[in-house]
Amino acid sequence: MLKETKKEALKRLNYVSGHVDGIKRMVDVEVYCVDILKQTYAVRRAIEKLESVILASHLRSHVIDGVKEGREKEVLGELLELYGVSNR
């Protein structure tokens, strides 16, 4: 993983972790369901952004390197697998 991507990913993961802890507290003190759901949607968006950052970095580095090294089938297989996992 590229150094700047790792830094950004860890920053986003810390945000998500803190947000999830906040949601746990909300559930514990029985905050209104709609307010809790709004926070879960925010966490989902944050995770989607994290995935986007990591995928973009992967495409710019590992995928390009793999193609240059003649591993097109392997690289394409991994991308197709990711696509399949993301659509479950």
Image (spheres, grey):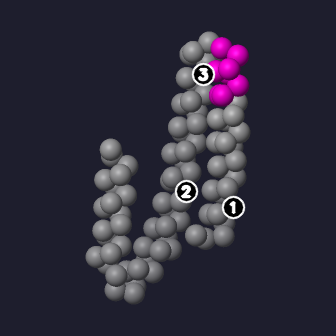
Using the image, determine if residue 55 lies above or below residue 22. below
Q: Which residue is mark 2?
A: 53
Mark before the other along the chain sequence, 2 or 1: 1
Q: Which residue is mark 3?
A: 36
Residue 5 horizontal/vertical position (percent) = 62, 63
Q: Which residue is mark 1?
A: 7
Q: Residue at x 33, y 46 (%)?
A: 87
Would residue 35 be found to the left or right of residue 84 on screen? right
Residue 42 horizontal/vertical position (percent) = 58, 33
Q: CA distance from mark 2 to mark 1?
A: 11 Å
Q: CA distance from mark 1 to mark 3?
A: 29 Å
Occupied quadrant, residue 32: top right
Question: Few, some or many C-alpha atoms within 10 Å of disc 2 (few <14, some 14-19, many ≥20)?
Answer: some
The secondary structure that most of the magenta stretch takes on is: helix
Residue 80 horizontal/vertical position (percent) = 31, 61
Q: Residue at x 64, y 42 (%)?
A: 16
Q: Residue at x 35, y 73 (%)?
A: 75
Using the image, determine if residue 32 lies above or below residue 51. above
Dot 1 amino acid type: Lys
The answer to whether the residues at label 1 and label 3 have Cβ atoms under 8 Å apart is no
Residue 84 horizontal/vertical position (percent) = 31, 53
Would residue 77 be found to the left or right of residue 35 on screen? left
- Find numbered disc 2 in the image and state the secondary structure of the residue it sits on: helix
- Find numbered disc 1 in the image and state the secondary structure of the residue it sits on: helix
Q: Is residue 31 magenta?
A: no
Using the image, determine if residue 76 lies above or below residue 83. below
Q: Which residues are magenta?
A: 23-30
Question: Few, some or many C-alpha atoms within 10 Å of disc 1 (few <14, some 14-19, many ≥20)?
Answer: few
Mark before the other along the chain sequence, 2 or 3: 3
